[in-house]
Image (cartoon, grey):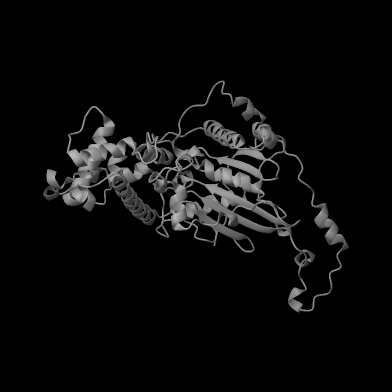
Amino acid sequence: MDDLSQNSSESTEGNSPFSGLAKAIKQDGSFPASSFGNGAFSNAILEHSKIPEPDYPYLIDASPTDYLLKPDWNQLIIIGNGFDLECGLHSTYRDFFASRRKILLCETTPGKRSEQSWGKCLKEAGISAWELILQDKYESYWYDIERAIKDWVAWDYTRIGFPSKNTAIVLQYIKSGAKSDQADPDRLVGAKVARYVEDTHPAAEIRGWEAEDVYDFLLEELHALEHEFASYLKGEIARSSDYKQNAIRLMWNLLNDEFPKDSDKYEIEESVLSFNYTRPFGSQLGRAPRTNILSNVHGSIEKDNIVFGIDGSDCMGLNKVIEFTKTYRLMALGSPDFSRVVHGDGKSPMSHSTDLIKFYGHSLADSDYSYFQAIFDRVGLYSGNTRLVFYYRPHKLRDGSMRSEKDVRESTMKSAIKLLTAYGRTMENVDHGKNLIHKLLLEGRLSVKLLPDDEVVPIG
C-alpha cells in the first residue's frame, strides 16, 4: 500500500533539476500534444453506409452508428493508499499500529502481565511476532514496511540455504537461551521474537527447530498480521460515515477527467487496478453502457485474501524467502487476470491497447516497479499510443498544515520521472530507453496535472 499523497513533506523549492520541466508544462497540466487522428475512417464508413429501414418499431430512433462496429476506448485507473487516505480512511500502518500500541506494550489486564506469559498475552490479544519486529517502523510508508520484512527474512542472504542474520539470531536464542545484547537492535528484536516463540510453543517442539522452521513460523505470523489488519480496516470502514461516498466521488472525478466528449462513438471500457485492500465502489464503477472492471492487486478485505509481500525481483531463487514474495503469494491465491484490465496491442482495426492510464495516490515506489513494467510492456509504451497522466492534489500533512500545490506537483513529477527512467533501463533498445520520456513528452503522451474536483452525480 502507498501513502504518497499524504506523507511526503520534503520541500522542492529553489533550483530543482525539475523546475525547467515544470515550466514547460501547460497550466492544465498537459504537455504539447500531437494529433492522433480525426476519425476520418469512421466518418467515411458512415457517409457511404446504406442503413436499411428497421423492421421493428423500437429501432426507429436508433442512430446509424448503432449498426456499425464501434472502435474501443479503454482507460485504466491505478490507485494507491493515497486514494483511501483522501477519502478519510485511516488506512496507514501508523494508524493500525497506534490502535494496538497499548496491547503491544503489554498494558493489558493485571492477571495477564506475568513475565512467564508475556508471549501468550500478546498472542491472545491478536499481536503477531511481526508487530514486535516492526514496532519501530509504525511511522513508515507501506513500502518501507515491506522493505523491513524483506530485510528481516532475506538480509545478508548470500548463499542458498543459509539463513538470514535475523533468522539465525532467533534460532540461536531458542537453542541456547542466550540473553540479548541491548546495544545491538537486531539482537534485541531477535530475542523478543525468540521469547514469543518459547511462550507460544511447547518446549519439546521447538527444541529441534532449524532455520526452515523459523521461516515457517514467520510466514504463519505474517498471515496472522494480514488477518488483523483486514479486521482493522473493516472496523474503520464501518465507523466512517462518509468514506464510501467520498471514494465514489473521487473515483468519478478520475473517470471523467479527459473522458471523450464524443463517447457515443466508442465502445467504452474503464478499469481500476487498486493497490489497496478496499472496494468502496463495489464492482460497478460507472453507468451502462460502460464496461467496468475492478481488480485489487494484493487481494481485498471483502474476499479475506489480502497479501503483504516483498519484492521478489532479486530473491526468487532463494529457498524459503520466495514464500514471502508477492509473486509467490499471488500465485498461491490465484492471481487475477490482469489482461482484463490492461489491453495490449489490438488484433483488429477496432481494438487496440489501453488508450489512457491514470495514476493517483500511489507512491510509485520501486517495490511495485515490476507491476508497472508489465503494464508498460503490454501496452507497448514506447511505440504505441497509450497516454500516461499522473494526478495530484494538495493535502494535509501529519502536523495539520496544508502541503502546497507546487510542492505536491513537483514531488509527483519526480516520482513519475524516476519510474519511467527505471522502466527505460529495462528496454532491449538502450537508445529507446534513454529517449523514452522525451518521446512521450513530444507526442503529448505524458502529463502531470491537478485532479479537478467537479460536482458529480453519485455512481448508482
Where is 25 relative to 51, above or below? above
Residue 61, position as x, y percentages in the image: 76, 71
Q: Is residue 105 visible?
A: no
Q: Nearer the viewer, residue 313 or 209?
A: 209
> Quarter-wise, where is residue 15 in the image?
top right
Q: Is residue 212 left or right of residue 333?
A: left
Where is 247 relative to 405, above or below? below
* Picture residue at 70% right of the left edge, 45% below the top: 385
Label count reads 0
Q: Quadrant of the N terminus?
A: top left
Q: Nearer the viewer, residue 454 or 441?
A: 441
> Quarter-wise, where is residue 137 in the image?
top left
Q: Nearer the viewer, residue 435 or 446?
A: 435
Q: Is residue 175 visible?
A: yes
Q: Is residue 236 left or right of residue 391?
A: left
Q: Nearer the viewer, residue 55 or 445?
A: 445
* Picture residue at 37% right of the left edge, 33% below the top: 156
Q: Is residue 7 left or right of residue 137?
A: right
Residue 155, position as x, y percentages in the image: 37, 35
Residue 165, position as x, y percentages in the image: 32, 35
List the single residue furthest toward the bottom. 56
